[in-house]
Image (cartoon, helix red, strand yellow):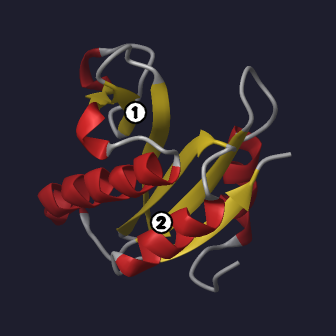
Amino acid sequence: MSDAIDEDLYQRTKALLEPGDIELNGVIVRTDLTGEEEPTLHQATLDVGNVIAEASGIDPKDTFVYSGNDDPEFGVNQHQGRTLEDEAFVWECQQLMRDGTYDVVFYYEADADQEAIVEGVEDLGFDATGVRGE
């Protein structure tokens, strides 16, 4: 676990991965982006989503982002990557403001290549901490 990610956030992320209908893994993406940089945060979310799609064997061109701004089931800073064909789940994220900058927690099906996701996020220039579900 990276020094940039505190134990509380790690444990909260792990709790999101608890067994449900599908097995999930996650990645915590630490940014230095502030609330004034939301367009950059949006692009970073899309870029990380593309990394996750590729590591899941899905062409990012075959996905779209569903944002919960108008959905009572979603928080304002909660987004999902879904497939164009059948709107199947690819990833979900929550953008969390912590100590003045955003950390973004992504989760996705556990059969995605976890190492490729962490490496891909780091290649984008962000600190990434992988979190495996049980």
Q: Which residue is mark 2?
A: 29
Which badge, 2 or 1, comes first in the chain's sequence?
A: 2
Residue 36's image quarter?
bottom left
Q: Is residue 82 visible?
A: yes
- x, y percentage for residue 22? 71, 27
**Does residue 80 lie above or below 121 as drawn?**
above
Percent x, y for residue 28?
55, 62
Corner quadrant of residue 59: top left
Instruction: Identify the residue at horizontal 16%, vertical 64% (top origin).
Output: 37
**Quadrant location of the C terminus in the rendered image:** top right
In whole angstroms, how far apart are the C-alphas of marks 2 and 1? Answer: 16 Å
Badge count: 2
Query: What amino acid is labelled 1 in the image?
Result: Gln
Farthest right residue in view: 134
Give the residue drawn at x 28%, y 33%.
62
Q: Quadrant of residue 86?
A: top left
* Residue 87, position as x, y percentages in the image: 38, 17
- Residue 95: in sight, yes or no? no
Q: Are marks 2 and 1 in contact (CB under 8 Å)?
A: no
Q: Position of residue 125 (x, y in %)?
A: 35, 81
Amino acid marked by disc 2: Val
Residue bearing the label numbered 1: 80
Residue closest to the far bottom:
3
Residue depicted at x 48% and y 45%: 57
Q: Is residue 68 left or right of residue 11?
A: left
Q: Secondary structure beneath disc 2?
A: strand
Q: Quadrant of the N terminus?
A: bottom right
Q: Which one is nearer the viewer's eye here, 61 or 87?
A: 61
Q: Residues within 10 Å of mark 1 (few under 14, many from 20)?
A: many
Of 80 and 110, the residue lying toward us: 110
